[in-house]
Image (cartoon, rainbow, N blue to C red):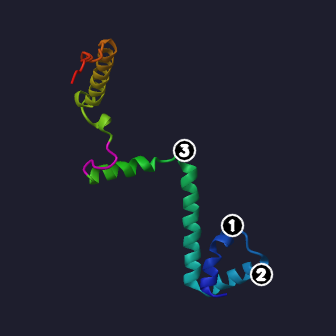
Amino acid sequence: MTPDEARELFSAALDDELDEEKRAAFEAALASSAPLASEWDEFRELMREAHQLGEEEDETPDLLAGVQRRLRVRSRGRFYRDRFATESHGRSMLPIVLGLVMLLAVAVAWITMRFVRVEAPPTPPASSSTE
């Protein structure tokens, strides 16, 4: 078995999914190549540490919030900007006040149109033509 073939079997060997023939060839390849054995040890250590990370932390880190915060800082607020949370209360109320003013203007226009009586234009007098 070549070292490249042995590297492809690292995950299967770690999960103990190799049959006896492949397991013997894998172990022979490790015994014959010191760099390959070193890589195998590093791979096992890395996987052990990765499994421990998940077991040690009770809470999953919020990666999205951290990425958004970094993007907001680097872009100077152009991306992921929460205007209502970052601005003062006076300016954050502006959209709400403008919305209420527009609602009031629409209500006044509707009431005005409802109570204004539109009369039909006067009809011209009938003329008798003797021409």
What is the three-letter code of the residue carrying label 3?
Asp
Find out whether residue 121 is within the magenta segment.
Answer: no
Task: Look at the numbered disc 1 and give the secondary structure of its residue.
Answer: loop
Quadrant housing residue 115: top left
Quadrant in which the N terminus appears? bottom right
Residue in view at x 57 percent, y 55 percent: 52
Q: Which of 8 and 57 is in front in this view?
A: 8
| Residue 97 x/y as whole percent | 27, 25
Q: Report the magenta stretch's main SS.
A: loop
Q: In the picture shown, does residue 95 fall above or below 64?
A: above
Q: How many angstroms separate mark 2 from mark 3 (CA)?
A: 41 Å
Residue 58 shows which numbered tag?
3
What is the three-letter code of the residue carrying label 1?
Asp
Residue placed under numbered mark 2 in the picture: 21
Residue in view at x 56 percent, y 52 percent: 54
Task: Look at the numbered disc 2 and give the secondary structure of its residue.
Answer: helix
Task: Look at the numbered disc 3 and give the secondary structure of its residue.
Answer: loop
Q: What stretch is highlighted in magenta?
A: 76-81
Labels 2 and 3: the sequence-earlier one: 2
| Residue 113 x/y as whole percent | 31, 17
